[in-house]
């Protein structure tokens, strides 16, 4: 294929046959992706691909806040220790310290960008700090009970206004383009194929650096607090490109998701328990002290398993989170969005307890990265929930997720700016010459529903060897059907998401099969004990 050169911008050679060319292509628009974009834009041409609109991601849904050492009575050592304890021996201590030490810098940056964190004149910081399960100090800075939304809206305005940032909304990433796929000697990431969902056309995007920031894989489960965009795209694409994945068996189930027959799952923030909420059985009996000395403030894995145990033991549909002993004004002030949402469903949380159940919440594993967010594939980075940095270990400490997004978004920016990456060659266009329009879309929706149900039943809070074997068998059958569908029909967003979800499900199950113990979020009836040595689970192609 002949090369046609038409312009040079910021050292980047532009090719006439490609739809877009950037210095840096960021796939995903959550906090990690937007942080990175803003730290690069002064010196690089940046493209941000997001499958829906800019705010349609998990970061926008985050309620609790950002964990950082801000108060005078708190210390870095304390935050590190709390993170290591929650991670059940699998956190990388050097990475944990690296992240925690940069907490104040990240919060100061957000304040400088205009994020309106909740004030508290009585605090030595000037801001209200709350506590959450697993934390030994009040260190979670927040914006009422909608921190993620406030942060994302603030950064969105900056990103949309920046002349060096191009936003490609309603664009769904299909796959990464690498040297290995093109038969080149180096397996460098060169760009990506992306589906323009409005036009139904796959476009080719070239970039010196590509960053996966697509979030987690919550939609692989039937019940999740995640938005519909959380379909494991970055993890699956990175795996197909040749990256290792780590610790995929550690899926965090948030203990308290609103249980309501006529409403979508809705997260009831960890901060409700942090501010005194008590978990009760339908008859009003408190049960958490019998499961852990920290009671409601135990880490999420312990609370979720306790709720799951009580529900199965007693045959009940849910348990109840009661904060009615607090003044009504206190509840409305600290949890305005939760109060309004529940009130719309006929639940007045100032007078009655909230019915709750566990739901999938966070993917602790992901694409293996180093301290600069680099993956195994040169030119490819992973940040945020898509990555496995070593911070979370076997269980993420509450409110460390947004902190990780900020720290590694900045770390990736520094590394990218320091590297003089080569110019990508001309990339082949997407070939649709041998496919046709799908004849029966029902195949996709049926397979999607089947996957989410058996993952919930077989690979949920408590697992067994038999359940994992059954799940893997069904995954392999689905993969065969999806591969045939993908090979013969034009791609659609639903097909792409299903393909990525099934791939991610396989990685979760295979990782779970390799862990012959119960540690953190991975609880096995066949291996109930804890092994003496904590080792990560690493899968390689």
Image: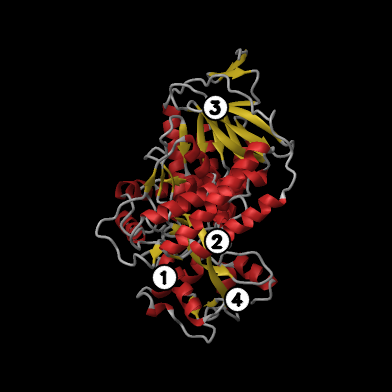
Counting residues from the N terminus, which is met first, the one under dot 4 or under dot 3? 3
Which quadrant, please, contains the C terminus?
top left
Mark 1 residue crowding within 10 angstroms, few (<14) / some (14–19) / many (20+) = many
Cα distance in 3D space between marks 4 and 3: 50 Å
Q: How far apart are marks 2 and 4 (CA)?
A: 33 Å
- Secondary structure of the residue carrying tag 4 is loop
Q: Which mark is residue 349?
A: 4
Q: Where is residue 487 in the image (x, y as percent from the top left)?
A: 63, 37
Give the mark toward the camera: 2 or 4.
2
Q: Is residue 333 depicted above or below 486 in this figure?
A: below
Q: Which residue is drawn at 56% across and 51% down?
A: 477
294 or 339, nearer to the observer? 294
- Which circle's residue, 2 or 3, is located before the other in the chain? 3
Q: State the image coordinates of residue 234 (x, y, percent, origin top left).
A: 52, 42
Q: Can you tell which mark lies on residue 283?
A: none
Sequence order check: which comes first, mark 3 or mark 1? 3
- The numbered mark at residue 207 is 3
Q: In this view, does 70 lie to the left or right of 482?
A: left
């Amino acid at each position: 294929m002949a090369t046609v050169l038409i312009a040079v911008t910021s050292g980047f050679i532009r090719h006439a046959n490609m739809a877009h060319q950037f210095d840096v292509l960021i796939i995903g628009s959550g906090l990690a992706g937007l942080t990175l974009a803003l730290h690069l834009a002064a010196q690089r041409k940046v493209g941000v691909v997001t499958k829906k609109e800019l705010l349609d991601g998990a970061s926008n849904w985050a309620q609790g806040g950002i964990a950082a050492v801000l108060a005078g009575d708190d210390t870095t050592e304390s935050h590190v220790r709390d993170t290591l304890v929650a991670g059940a021996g699998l956190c990388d201590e050097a990475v944990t310290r690296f992240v925690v030490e940069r907490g104040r810098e990240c919060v100061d940056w957000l304040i400088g960008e205009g994020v309106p964190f909740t004030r508290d004149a009585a605090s030595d910081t000037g801001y209200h700090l709350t506590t959450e399960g697993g934390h030994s100090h009040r260190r979670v800075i927040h914006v009422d009970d909608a921190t993620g939304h406030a942060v994302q809206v603030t950064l969105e305005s900056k990103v949309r206004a920046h002349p060096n940032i191009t936003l490609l909304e309603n664009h769904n990433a299909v796959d990464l383009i690498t040297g290995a796929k093109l038969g080149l000697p180096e397996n460098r990431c060169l760009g990506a194929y992306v589906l323009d969902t409005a036009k139904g056309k796959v476009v080719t995007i070239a970039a010196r650096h590509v960053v996966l920031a697509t979030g987690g894989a919550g939609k692989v489960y039937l019940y999740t607090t995640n938005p519909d965009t959380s379909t494991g795209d970055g993890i699956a694409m990175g795996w197909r490109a040749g990256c290792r994945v780590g610790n995929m068996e550690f899926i965090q189930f948030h203990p308290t998701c609103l249980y309501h027959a006529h409403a979508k799952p809705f997260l009831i923030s960890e901060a409700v328990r942090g501010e005194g909420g008590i978990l009760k059985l339908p008859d009003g009996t408190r049960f958490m002290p019998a499961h852990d000395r920290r009671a409601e403030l135990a880490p999420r894995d312990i609370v979720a398993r306790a709720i799951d145990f009580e529900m199965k033991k007693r045959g009940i549909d849910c348990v109840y989170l009661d904060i009615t002993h607090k003044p009504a004004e206190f509840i409305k002030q600290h949890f305005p969005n939760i109060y309004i949402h529940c009130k719309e469903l006929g639940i007045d949380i100032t007078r009655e307890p909230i019915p709750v159940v566990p739901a999938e919440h966070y993917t602790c594993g992901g694409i293996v990265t180093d301290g600069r967010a680099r993956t195994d594939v040169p030119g490819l980075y992973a940040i945020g929930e898509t990555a496995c940095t070593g911070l979370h270990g076997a269980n993420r400490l509450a409110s460390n997720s947004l902190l990780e997004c900020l720290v590694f978004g900045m770390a990736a920016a520094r590394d990218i700016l320091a590297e003089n990456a080569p110019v990508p060659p001309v990339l082949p266009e997407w070939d649709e010459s041998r496919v046709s329009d799908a004849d029966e879309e029902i195949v996709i929706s049926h397979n999607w529903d089947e996957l989410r149900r058996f993952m919930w039943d077989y690979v949920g809070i408590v697992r067994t060897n038999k359940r994992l074997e059954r799940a893997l068998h069904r995954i392999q059958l689905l993969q065969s059907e999806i591969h045939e569908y993908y090979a013969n029909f034009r791609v659609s967003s639903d097909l792409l998401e299903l393909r990525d979800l099934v791939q991610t499900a396989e990685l979760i199950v295979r990782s779970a099969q390799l862990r012959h113990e119960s540690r953190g979020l991975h609880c096995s009836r066949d291996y109930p004990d804890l092994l003496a040595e904590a080792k990560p689970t690493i899968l390689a192609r």
